[in-house]
Image: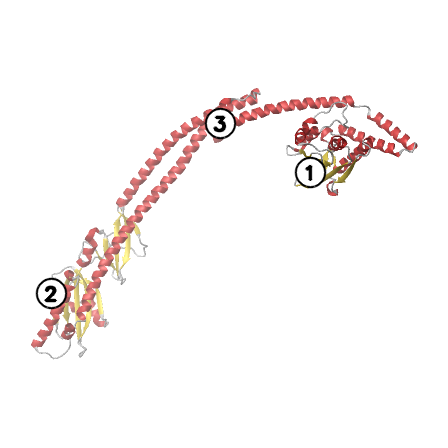
Amino acid sequence: MFRDQSLRFKIIFSVVSYILVIGISGNVFLYLYLMEAVSQKGERLDRAYLEAARFRISQNLANVFSLAMVCASDPAVSQAVSRQERTRQELIRVSLNAQNNLNAFLQSNPVSPYIDKLILFNDEGLFVQATGRHGGEFPDLDNIRRLPLYRRLVQENLPRISGFGSSITPMNWHDTYILLLRVRGSYYNSAGGYLYVEAGLDMITGLLRRDGVSPEMFLRISETGEAVMPAELRLTRPEPGDPGYVPEDVVFPYRFRHGNRSYRLDALPLENGALVLYNQVDVTTLALDDRQILYTVLAVALISLFAVAGLALILSFFLTRPIEALIRRIRKISEENDFSADPEIEKRGDEIGLIGRAINEMSGNISLFLLKMEESYREQKNTEIALLQSQINPHFLYNTLDSIRWMARIQNNPAIADIVRRLINLLRNIAARTDSGGAGAKITLAEELQILEDYTGVMSIRFMGSFDVVNRVPQALLDCRIPKLTLQPLVENAIIHGIEPSDRFGVITLSAAEDGDYLDIVVEDTGIGMSREQLETVKTRNRTRKPGSPSLNNIGIVNVDERLKLLYGESCGLFFESGEGTYTRAHVKILKER
């Protein structure tokens, strides 16, 4: 399994996998992004060509219409089609005036190079033709009247009509753009005629091919489905698969394949909506370019993969060597109990060097801890021996003291009886400490205060009432549990080292308060206090008591502090504050238990 493999294998595998996933994903994303960017740029360029061609075609068609409107609104043209009696000379003059104006208008129009015929006629036999690309012929008038556009204009009484169709010139096989317009007569006669404008398809096909515009561009007539192709001057009706064929109900841009070629078809309608300009672009070459980009991206990804794999191999070599040294050092600690420091594993300045330094510190701490444990064990043995040596038969001692108490009561001496009673209670509590749990036995705070009451009663007799004890412990905290005989050494220390040397009456105040999850018990005296130096050495000074010292149970302040730390942790124990010549305050901080 993977977790059982070596660190070197995991590093190489992880780095290569990461680069493989991220690299390939990044390169695929880059490829797709580049392909999309190239495609969008091509589409925008083709769209710009399409809009430019539409503008030019629409402008030419608008110029044809403008030419027809200018001619139809000319007074000479209106007079020519008016119905009135004229002599032959007047008819010739009016017709020549109209023809001259038609020629002038035609020559000044931008689409004049594409106008095949510009004819003015009416039902009265008027036939006036401007000079276009094709000359007039006798059948022209009949051919106009046979046109479907003319018949529709007359039948539906339309003001004008336009469309595509065959030329009226017999020898012109090309299709044309035709515009028929009604021409009103002069203001004094409502009779009128018609204006026929015929423009060649090269007016449109030339725009589809010029200026490098894509040769696949074509114009489609929406109503008939016929198309104006760039290389044809006749209308075509493309079949499926032919250039210029547009399927029904497609969304543009429309992509399709024909044979082994790929195409993109885009559409842009002209202003009137009857004509739609299309651009059919062969994107096969673009797809080949995209494939080349893909191959390039894959090649870069493979090269990067091999480069990173080599780098991972080198990196794993530099990482695994110091780690193997750390493993050898840890095995020496665990298997050979060698806790000496190894400077070689912390020479590096990186994180591995920090780990080596931490291992050396750990081995040193373990060695120090073992030494402390050994010393603690020796002290515990010495204490147990001292306790055994100092023990006497408790039943004999209790019976003797009880006899003395009864003799004092018989002799009517209650003070002696009371102090003996208190002493009996103290000795029983000390004996009970050894018999039931040792140093870790716990009692309620109320029971601990009862022990203090007996102890201070005995000490008050000894020191002739030179002090008083004030109990300010809240009733709600009396059921909290503390190690037995925790407060007695502190009260004893306050009497002997605080109040007794002061040569004045003193007060010992007991109080307690909750501090979160902790219980803070305070023993404060009004004795001589301590200087800063004495405060710093108070624990060491009381670590051991010499035989014959005035102590009830040989439990020093340092012993109490160490006992509390063992039971509750390093954050607990004894804490002191003092004012020289005024007071000493000892805090007992333990975890709150009930």
Kind of element beneath mark 2:
loop
Task: Please say if 233 is above or below 556.
Answer: below
Which comes before the other along the chain, label 1 or label 2?
A: 2
Q: What residue did someone put label 2 on?
A: 131
Residue 254 percent coordinates (x, y): 30, 52
Please tell me which of labels 1 and 3 falls first in the chain.
Answer: 3
Sequence-wise, the earlier of marks 3 and 2 is 2
Separation of marks 1 and 2 at Cα, in angstroms: 121 Å
- Of badges 1 and 2, the one in the foreground is 1
Q: Quadrant of the C terminus?
A: top right
Residue 284: quadrant of the picture:
top left
x and y percent of residue 39 in the render? 30, 47
Q: Relative to residue 30, is residue 75 depicted above or below?
A: below
Q: Which mark is residue 520?
A: 1
Q: Amino acid at mark 3?
A: Gly
Whether label 1 touches label 3, CB < 8 Å: no
Q: Is residue 592 visible?
A: no
Q: Secondary structure at mark 3?
A: helix
Q: Badge 3 local density, few (<14 within 10 Å), some, or many (20+)?
A: some
Task: For marks 1 and 3, give the CA distance.
Answer: 43 Å
Taking the spot 56% from the left edge, 26% from the top edge, the residue there is: 362
Q: Write down the residue under mark 3.
A: 353
| Residue 321 placement (x, y as % from top left) | 46, 24
